[in-house]
Amino acid sequence: MTIEQRARSAGVHLVLLAYSALAIGPILLVVMNSFKARSAIFGAPLAPPDASTFSLIGYDKVLRSSNILTYYSNSLIVTLVSMALVLLFGAMAAWALTEYRFRGSTLLGLFLSIGIMVPIRLGSVAILNMMRSAGLNDTLTALILVYVAQGLPMSIFILSEFIQQIPRDLRDAARCDGVPETRIFLEVIAPLLRPAIATVAVFTIVPIWNDLWFPLILTSSDKTHTVTLGVQQFLGQYITDWNSVLAALSMAILPVVMIYIILSRQLIAGLTSGAVK
Amino acid sequence: MSNLRIDHLYKRYGAATVLDDINLGIETGEFVVLVGPSGCGKSTLLRMIAGLDGASGGDIHIAGKLVNNLAPAARGIAMVFQSYALYPHMNVRKNMTFGLKFTGVAPAEREKRVAEAARMLRLEELLERYPRDLSGGQRQRVAIGRAIVREPAVFLFDEPLSNLDAALRVSTRVEIANLHRLLKATIVYVTHDQVEAMTLADRIVVMNKGRIEQVGKPLDLYYAPANLFVAGFIGSPAMNFFAAKVESVAGGRARVTGAGFRSFDLPAASLNVGDTLTIGVRPEHLSRGTNGAFAVEGIVELVERLGEASFAHIRRPDDKLFVAEVRGREAPAVGEKTTLVAAAQDVQVFDAAGLRISI
Ligand SMILES: Nc1ncnc2c1ncn2[C@@H]1O[C@H](COP(=O)(O)OP(=O)(O)O)[C@@H](O)[C@H]1O
Ligand SMILES: [Mg+2]
């Protein structure tokens, strides 16, 4: 490397480091302070917990005094079921739209791509009415339906790009071999889509897990609240229980971080070799 | 018995006619090579035989059964693709057996067929490997193995050697020829390489622009090409063509003249005074000398030395180039003025429409 190249690379890394600090900083702050006593949170918010300030009171309170475990399992159910449905239907739709020419296939593709551009929240009122008249008000099913609709367009778009890159000969070879169309999809195409599926999974999971809006308007009872909504109950108008808020937030972050770690290798492969060419 | 019959087959994409009235019959056990320039419709024809593309018109019979509306797997074909098209996430054994389980072959029978194919193709050591860990030639053999285990009525090969390097291509060519002999299989083999076609085929089908130009045994195509296209396509380097005219007809002999070669006589046959002809002579039939029915002279402009022979590119007096294959050690020197002759039997005559006149 020449000096110029080295300088440029150092510059790039500096920018990336700064960005990482900016992104990780608040998370670190939340997690760090969730392990501190209330006085220490306010006294020295930037200091890590030490022997004198360490306290698990936040976690204790959250786990004992509230429905956090219900919220947690609600979030998990909604997120995982939505993700599974988005991946399944997304991959199937992407396969159908790229592999088969049928009447209206172009129009259908166009219609789905509109879903990428128009945020689903614009339809909140209509969705609310729809769910109410369908009797799905205050159910997890309502949330799952909305999230599947929200995640599908992007996943179809990304997966279509990937499917197009799979050589046509491979599908033709399978057809000559006598493999039925569904098995071609499930046993030849789907395994090759693994990196893409990891990418789509992360893109689908994160916004669903973090969403506050739809639980807020579609759920009304404790038994259907999700974590993000549940945390709100510690934020009072007059007093905020910071220990509990921070502990609940830390717990809410955990699954997303874990998914990132598990899928990160596939994710990078997916990002660099697919839709984002 | 005819194993594969194609009648009045058409393929159109919008206004473009890609296959134009294809008629072809292939006998059981025959090795037929479809050859033609890139884009002439060879792959399209093969894919239609396989059932991967639908026909715009016409019928295909395989083993006496009309297969127009049958799915590829029901047609009794197996196809080997140019890109091999191995399933990347399955090992060699799985690649070969994967299709079989859908066509109702019992597990024990599958294993037997795989073992047999692996032995024939020397793949025994590689059965547990994945395609990414195989060389190009090995992948090719796996692709062939996957076709063999299906025990098809017809094997379809689409340019199977074009992704291999030159040395491997020659050895794989020999292997395919051996395999054909061993399996007594009916094979339709597509290539754009006329050497492959000549060496492998029982019969060659020469295609051009979606039509069949000629069907025949390799040497028939070489010595009796039906028209200018086949004459120019078969043989390497390509046949030399000279524009000519019939100057006079007298006593059963026609005198043929043209720019760049010495006038000569032909049996008059159907020729008339003033007919426009094309004279064709293969480079390997030209030799240096003075005595021959056909003689052409020119100045050597470029010499390609191959060892056993040299290709001399020679500028004719009418400023066109032609090629002569000069055998032996005595390669002509660049700039040398030389005369080349050919025997009467090696001179092909084509009429104004480009069809060969047999004389
Ligand atoms: N899907 C298609 N749409 C339009 N034209 C096509 C299509 N597939 C092939 N063709 C045309 O058909 C012709 C023959 O193609 P192909 O059979 O692949 O030629 P070859 O295998 O002889 O090189 C080409 O000119 C190609 O452009
Ligand atoms: Mg081709």
Image: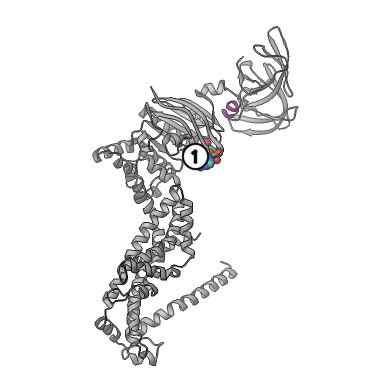
Q: Chain of mark 1?
A: B
State the residue position of label 1. Answer: B162
- Tell me where residue B306 appears, x and y as whole percent: 59, 33
Q: Which quadrant holds residue A43? A: bottom left
Report if residue B37 is visible in the image.
yes
Q: Could you classify mark 1 by the number of other residues whose Cα lies within 10 Å: few (under 14), some (14-19), or many (20 or more)?
A: some
Q: Kindly identify the residue that appears in the image at 43 percent across and 77 percent down.
A: A24
Q: Which residues are magenta?
A: B229-233
Q: Which quadrant holds residue B151? A: top left
Looking at the image, what colour scheme do you see? one colour
- Helix, strand or loop at mark 1: loop
Closest to the observer, B292 or A160:
A160
Number of residue marks: 1
Q: Amino acid at mark 1?
A: Ser
Pick out the residue farthest to the top.
B251
- Tell me where residue B268 appears, x and y as whole percent: 67, 11
Q: Main secondary structure of the magenta part?
A: helix
Image quadrant containing the N terminus of chain A: bottom right
